[in-house]
Image (cartoon, rainbow, N blue to C red):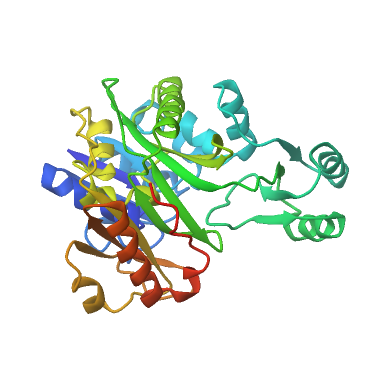
Amino acid sequence: MTIGVVGGGQLGRMLALAGYPLGEDFLFLDRSANTPAGQIAPSLVGEFTDQKLLRELARRSDVLTFDWENISLESLRKLGRAAHIAPPLTALAAAQDRVAEKRLFAKLGIQSTRYAAVESPVSFSRALRLIGTPGILKTRRLGYDGKGQAIVRNLEQATIAYESLRGAPLIYEEFIPFDYEVSIIGARSTRGEIVVYPLNHNLHRDGVLRLTRAPWSAPALQRNATIHLCRMLEHFRYEGILNIEFFVHGGRLLANEIAPRVHNSGHWSIEGAATSQFENHLRAILGLPLGATTARGHSAMINFIGAMPNRALILNIPEAHWHDYGKTARAGRKVGHMTLLAESATARDKMARKLIKEIDPASLSALSLSRRR
């Protein structure tokens, strides 16, 4: 079968790499042929809104999926019943609008932070009175990796933040001094089968994920996060991989956002789980039995930001796995990642700390590795 993918980034590349052993073919659509996915699979080149190209992609594919959520929902909707699109567009719509996302959390009984939609200076003033400071002003759409948002600690900063983001629909959220962040990833197939991965513990710097550790052994959090995830999967009659990010505050989960696609915090599963998130995404949308999500030891996934590090340094480590996305170096850009496998959380964290000190020393103080689970 042929899987059509809208977007040809590193997530699409890893989908193809997971799909080829299953005997599947791939066709991508992206603005350039020289994308991470385009280096290993055929691509249609043009805008994501090009209806002619989208129709060709649908015609040549058995199922359509996407490797990021900032794509044109309306363009995909215009394909109608001519295309089987998975995950469902209703989930994509919720993920594209932070207010819709918050309303979804409330509808499903998933606790989140307080918020208010901001459409004008008057509504922003109302939001400040209602929620107070500190808070975070964000664009409702097209925000990722810390982009399109500003922390508001006082009224002076509120004015600066609003001026920097005005012109787009906004949302103002309560700022929570959370203890740490976790994410839960699971898949639901076209047959209604569901599998869930162990909880991920995520550490960021400058709004970009730097380190994920899994499994994160916190039974109560795993249980509650799984309940929330399964409720959402059933709500959408979902097909594919879904990720929910949570803040942990005082032992409680506060939902932050969803990603209706394979996710950066699940990259560890390529070597660290019985079945990777990428393979299970494909199995799910193709109606195949889902694979086991059991962790193989303790994993640490480290993102390479800006440029690839010394390869020999990484490959000299037993159970270190190197992933180069084929991107040119650029400040702030995710160009690759590595995964470490260890027999214990202590050994994993010791290796991760040593490597981060070597390849990303600026992150060492920002990434606390003292808490082990």
Q: In which quarter of the image is the N terminus?
A: top left
Q: Which of 373 and 186 is in front in this view?
A: 373
Q: Is residue 78 visible?
A: no
Q: Does 263 sit above or below residue 107?
A: below
Q: Position of residue 340 (x, y in %)?
A: 26, 60
Which of 213 and 335 lies nearest the eye of the viewer?
Answer: 213
As drawn, is 339 to the left or to the right of 211? left
| x and y percentages locating residue 114 in the rendered image | 70, 35
Give the vertical position of 11 relative to 118 (above or below): below
Q: Is residue 173 visible?
A: yes
334 shown above or below 162: below
Residue found at x 59% / y 58%: 147
In the rendering, at what x and y percent does residue 44 appear? Answer: 32, 54
For this view, does 47 lie left or right of residue 25?
A: right
x and y percentages locating residue 161 in the rendered image: 77, 58
* Marker count (numbered): 0
The residue lying at 52 percent from left, 57 percent from top is 145
Horizontally, residue 308 falls left or right of residue 160, namely left
Residue at 39% x, 54% y is: 212
